[in-house]
Image (tube, rainbow, N blue to C red):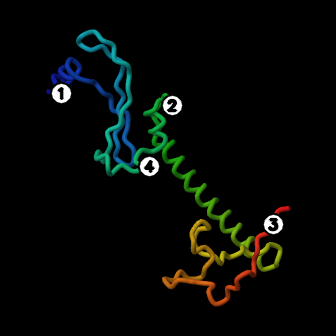
Amino acid sequence: MSRIAGVLRRTFGVVREHVGTDHLGNKYYSIPEQKTWTGRLVRAKRMVVAANPTEYEYTEGSIPIEWDAWIRGRRKEPPSIEELLKNVSYREQIKLKAKEVEEKDLALQAKEYEEGLVATPAKTVAKGHAAATSFGKQEITEEPTSTGNTFQPGSWMPTSKK
């Protein structure tokens, strides 16, 4: 039965060769260059059948970067299992080293603050945005503010141009 299905698929449809499967369950196929029944030449293609085919559930990282490079034609051969495992362990090592460097940097920064070598960051007193009418005020109130009790007429005069 499979031989008949293969003949029918080659005659009327697309022949695709299973290349591999990643750890997420995505399946990768290669479609070789072939001629259709009308004689038209169809170029070779690479495709993925996602383990989670609904588009709205796709997240970045659903396809490993090695397989993504193969799909896009940036590499000729599909990635091997050994290469994938090696790259995963390498990424984990990089994450650990980055965490160690960040911890060292925070400890050094705290030490510099304690010794007075570096000024502590200034804390912003004013809240809000500078373009807002209430910038710099401690509290926004509904009550109107006025200078009526302290205003003195004639206390300020514009300078005259001569």
Give the amino acid at mark 3: Ser
Q: Position of residue 110 (x, y in %)?
A: 73, 75
User: Is 68 above or below relative to 43?
Assistant: below
Q: Residues within 10 Å of mark 3 (few under 14, many from 20)?
A: few
Q: Which residue is mark 3?
A: 160
Q: Position of residue 70 (x, y in %)?
A: 46, 34
* Res 111 → quadrant: bottom right
- Labels 4, 1: front one: 4
Q: Earlier in the sequence, mark 4 or mark 1?
A: 1
Please report the residue visible at 26 percent of the width from the left and 24 percent of the height from the top: 14
**Mark 4 touching mark 3, by CB under 8 A?**
no
Q: Which residue is mark 4?
A: 61
In this rendering, would 127 be left or right of 142?
Answer: right
Q: Earlier in the sequence, mark 2 or mark 3?
A: 2
Q: Which residue is mark 2?
A: 75
Instruction: Tell me if I can see residue 100 in this picture.
Output: yes
Please report the residue visible at 32 percent of the width from the left and 50 percent of the height from the top: 56
Give the amino acid at mark 2: Arg
Q: CA distance from mark 2 to mark 3?
A: 78 Å
Instruction: Tell me if I can see residue 111 in this picture.
Output: no
Q: Residue furthest top?
A: 39
Per the image, label 4 sits on a secondary structure element best described as loop
- Labels 1, 2: front one: 2
What is the total number of numbered labels drawn onto the structure image? 4
* Res 78 → quadrant: top left
**Mark 2 touching mark 4, by CB under 8 A?**
no
Q: CA distance from mark 4 to mark 3?
A: 70 Å
Quadrant containing the C terminus is bottom right
Q: CA distance from mark 4 to mark 1?
A: 35 Å
